Image (tube, rainbow, N blue to C red):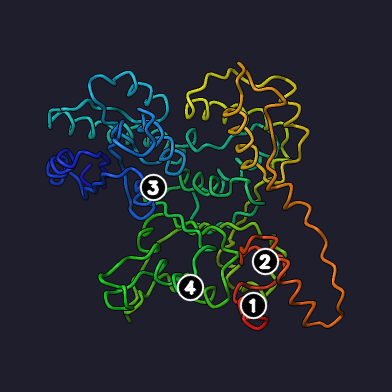
């Protein structure tokens, strides 16, 4: 407990102040937040061991049990974090329900200070006892990976083999297959599971944000740098750093990332002093490895750094037998979210799901079940309740582009314009289709004044 960082989330400012004063001498650090909408952002940026989470808030979701919603968010993205629910006396039944959804315990307010400290200490002590029995795989049952097919059993076996090592792992797979879930599960099964797990979508970072976000900066390094700020590498020190969409970063950023991985140190913007970092690196991309190995797109020396081992996440169409399990899981989740009592899926609905090829993979299945839960008025989900994403169907069958001109520059201009329009201005996806880096595509956009 003395080494723990605890986040308290409650819209009562007096309670936040009192709890911070109480906990400060007993733990490493206390963070407080009154707005639950900022909860996930805080967890992404800090090494948090426990969240004290209020069951109800005055705004946001307005379901009367917002705590269950935020509990589900925490456990899905940060399954290693203990969640202690804060509830009023009249909502104890709701708090008991939260235990079934992954909460470590709950406490009724107003509480006695000694009671709160004992409850927190009990949660940490209980976890340590479990760790002695299962030092690596303590959180495996909560890592959210669903599937009993042979291909998923093989995936689970590989994860169990690589998780306890310090090897850098590259996770490959199509969009929507759950690469981020695999990364989180590897961390939970690793020897670093009690330390930070920091996720960064590097594909969404602009070139100007890349360094400041990953490596941090010193006060005065640029116009808006009003204070020193740690980067994601420092936040992940001692734990795991997950770089999502790594296949989309430009060559200059690849060089900077390679330097950090080689030297095991970062140099914040505005500083000349390197800071040592100890991280285990996980990366993910939807770009096939053969395509990634094209040096005009991605540095081979960086591939070797991030790819000591690789894990291929199967597409949903490769594990059709898992579709009913996944559908039932999402049905249970959305029943709770939308306060429905749908009992299950009828056989024709299951058959419809199994016959569909799911270009959007598990993400599209989740979307389809959510829509069905919202729209269904029956006791169970029928085939007619299930509609598949028009977005995926549209992307799956792009219209062929015809060019009347044989002028090479004009053909290139039209190809670029067509790709930009097809992906609604998404530069990363358009560049990927055209076989260009984002930087190269930006240069051509400027050249052709598009």
User: Judging from the image, what secondary structure is the residue with disc 1 in?
Assistant: helix
Looking at the image, which is closer to me, 163 or 45? 45
In this rendering, would 109 be left or right of 150?
Answer: left
Badge 1: few (under 14), some or many (20 or more) residues near its Cα, within 10 Å?
Answer: some
User: Judging from the image, what secondary structure is the residue with disc 2 in?
Assistant: helix
Mark 4 vs mark 3: which is more N-terminal?
3
Looking at the image, which is closer to me, 170 or 347? 347
Contact check, label 2 and label 1, Cβ < 8 Å:
yes
Write down the quadrant of residue 121 in the picture. top left
Mark 1 vs mark 3: which is more N-terminal?
3
Badge 1 is on which residue? 445
Badge 4 is on which residue? 262
Q: Position of residue 237 (x, y in %)?
A: 36, 60
**For residue 142, above or below residue 222:** above
Screen quadrant of the N terminus: top left
Badge 2 is on which residue? 420
Give the label, 4 or 3, closer to the camera. 3
Q: Position of residue 389 (x, y in %)?
A: 68, 42
Q: CA distance from mark 2 to mark 1?
A: 10 Å
Badge 4: few (under 14), some or many (20 or more) residues near its Cα, within 10 Å?
Answer: few
User: Judging from the image, what secondary structure is the residue with disc 4 in?
Assistant: helix
Q: Position of residue 3 (x, y in %)?
A: 24, 47
Mark 4 vs mark 1: which is more N-terminal?
4
Contact check, label 4 and label 1, Cβ < 8 Å:
no
Residue 40, numbered circle:
3
Mark 4 vs mark 2: which is more N-terminal?
4
The residue drawn where x is 42% and y is 70% is: 264
The residue drawn where x is 40% and y is 54% is: 239
Screen quadrant of the C terminus: bottom right
In this rendering, would 383 be left or right of 205?
Answer: right
Badge 3: few (under 14), some or many (20 or more) residues near its Cα, within 10 Å?
Answer: some
**For residue 312, above or below residue 404:** above
């Amino acid at each position: 407990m003395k080494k723990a960082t605890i986040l308290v989330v409650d819209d009562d400012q007096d309670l936040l102040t009192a709890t911070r004063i109480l906990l400060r001498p007993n733990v490493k650090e206390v963070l407080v937040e009154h707005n639950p909408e900022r909860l996930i952002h805080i967890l992404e940026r800090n090494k948090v061991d426990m969240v004290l989470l209020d069951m109800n808030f005055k705004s946001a979701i307005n379901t009367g049990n917002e705590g269950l919603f935020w509990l589900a968010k925490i456990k899905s993205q940060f399954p290693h974090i203990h969640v202690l629910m804060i509830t009023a006396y009249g909502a104890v039944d709701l708090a008991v329900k939260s235990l079934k959804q992954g909460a470590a315990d709950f406490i009724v307010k107003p509480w006695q200070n000694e009671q709160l400290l004992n409850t927190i200490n009990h949660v940490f002590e209980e976890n340590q006892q479990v760790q002695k029995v299962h030092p690596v795989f303590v959180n495996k049952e909560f890592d959210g990976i669903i599937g009993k097919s042979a291909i998923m059993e093989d995936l689970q076996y590989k994860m169990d083999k690589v998780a306890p090592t310090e090897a850098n792992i590259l996770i490959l797979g199509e969009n929507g297959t759950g690469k981020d879930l695999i990364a989180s599960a590897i961390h939970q099964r690793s020897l670093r599971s009690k330390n930070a797990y920091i996720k960064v979508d590097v594909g969404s970072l602009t070139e100007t944000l890349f360094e400041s976000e990953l490596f941090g900066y010193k006060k005065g390094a640029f116009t808006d740098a009003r204070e020193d700020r740690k980067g994601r590498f420092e936040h992940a020190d001692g734990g795991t750093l997950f770089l999502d969409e790594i296949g989309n970063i430009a060559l200059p950023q690849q060089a900077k990332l390679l330097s950090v991985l080689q030297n095991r140190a970062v140099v914040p913007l505005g500083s000349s002093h390197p800071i040592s970092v100890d991280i285990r690196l996980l990366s993910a991309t939807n770009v096939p490895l053969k395509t990634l190995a094209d040096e005009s797109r991605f540095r081979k020396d960086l591939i070797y750094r991030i790819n000591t081992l690789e894990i291929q996440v199967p597409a949903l169409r490769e594990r059709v037998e898992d579709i009913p399990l996944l559908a039932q899981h999402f049905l249970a989740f959305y029943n709770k979210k939308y306060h429905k009592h749908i009992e299950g899926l009828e056989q024709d609905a299951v058959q419809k799901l199994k016959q569909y090829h799911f270009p959007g993979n598990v993400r599209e299945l989740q979307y389809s079940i959510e829509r069905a839960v919202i729209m269904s008025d029956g006791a169970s989900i029928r085939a007619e309740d299930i509609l598949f994403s028009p977005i995926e169907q549209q992307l799956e069958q792009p219209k062929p582009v015809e060019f009347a001109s044989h002028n090479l520059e004009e053909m290139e201009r039209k190809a670029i314009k067509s790709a930009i329009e097809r992906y609604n201005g998404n530069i990363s996806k358009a560049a990927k289709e055209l076989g260009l880096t984002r930087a190269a595509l930006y240069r051509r956009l400027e050249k052709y004044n598009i």
